[in-house]
Amino acid sequence: MKKLVIFDLDGTLLNTITDLGMAANYALKKNGFAEHDIERYPFFVGNGVRKLIERVLPPATGNEKTIERMLVDFKEYYNCHNTDFTEPYPGIVQLLHDLTAMGVKIAVASNKYQAATESIIKHFFGDLEWSVICGQKENFPVKPDPSIVFSILGEVEVPKDDTLFVGDSGVDMETAWRACVDSAGVTWGFRSEKELRSNHSKFIAHDAAALMDIIKGVHLADYI
């Protein structure tokens, strides 16, 4: 059984896409740009808020001044509305409680900026003991750079072999691969199973029960 599970946040623990999309659309509208359908946002997110803003802007309009202004407007909205439509995926709350009851350490590694990461975790999972809550910080590389994993491992002091990284995107799977830790790609999030597999996922989980099996190290052949 794994001793530490590092979770991505958006698309893995929580379905945040509507609140993210509405915040980006708020910033777009405020700055005179066309908004996007919420259904398009799963393909915009995953590499941090700055990259999200770059992706939603029309071509040739993403100069530094515009991006910085959009970031301010995005955070202005998102900091007040990041739990309006967000909710945990089925089985996640019970899974996290079961893991902590079993003595498994849990951590978060997100490309969402640190303040929002901490706020959302406190709102939805504040009754749980988290070993580390790590969001995107200034002058710190975002995933798929593996530094975020190394930082967590340094704080928790659990060997790589006893660690599992769980995420819903190719960015997450590449992060785990580059950090040399096992990965489990979840198919209930924002990206496809094909993307997970093409980015070095070791295991695939279609629901929380499957993810628990992977963490426990049972029936692993069923999830490769």
Image (tube, grey):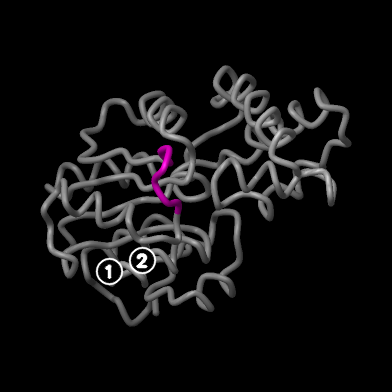
Please tell me which residue is depicted at 63% across the width and 36% down the height of the picture: 20
Which amino acid does the dot numbered 1 rest on? Val
Side (left or right) of 14 relative to 118: right
Q: Which mark is residue 159?
A: none
Tell me the quarter of the picture where residue 56 sits: top right
For the residues marked 2 and 1, what is the alpha-carbon distance in whole angstroms? 5 Å
* Residue 97 position by quadrant: top left
Badge 1 density bin: few <14, some 14–19, many ≥20, Cα 10 Å? some
Within the image, what quadrant is residue 127 found in? top left
What residue sits 50% from the left and 76% below the top? 197
| Secondary structure type for disc 2 | helix
| Quadrant position of the N terminus in the picture | bottom left
Q: Are marks 2 and 1 in contact (CB under 8 Å)?
A: yes
Q: Label 2: how many residues lie within 10 Å, few (<14), some (14-19) or many (20+)?
A: many
Rendered location of residue 169, percent (x, y): 52, 61
Label placed on residue 176:
2
Q: Is 119 left or right of 29, judged from the image as shown?
A: left
In the depicted view, which residue is nearer to us: 147 or 124?
147
Regarding mark 1 in the picture, which secondary structure is present there? loop
Residue position for label 1: 181
Q: Is residue 162 left or right of residue 110?
A: left
Viewer-proximal residue, 185 or 220? 185
Magenta stretch, residue numbers:
136-142
In the visual, does 31 lie left or right of 83?
A: right
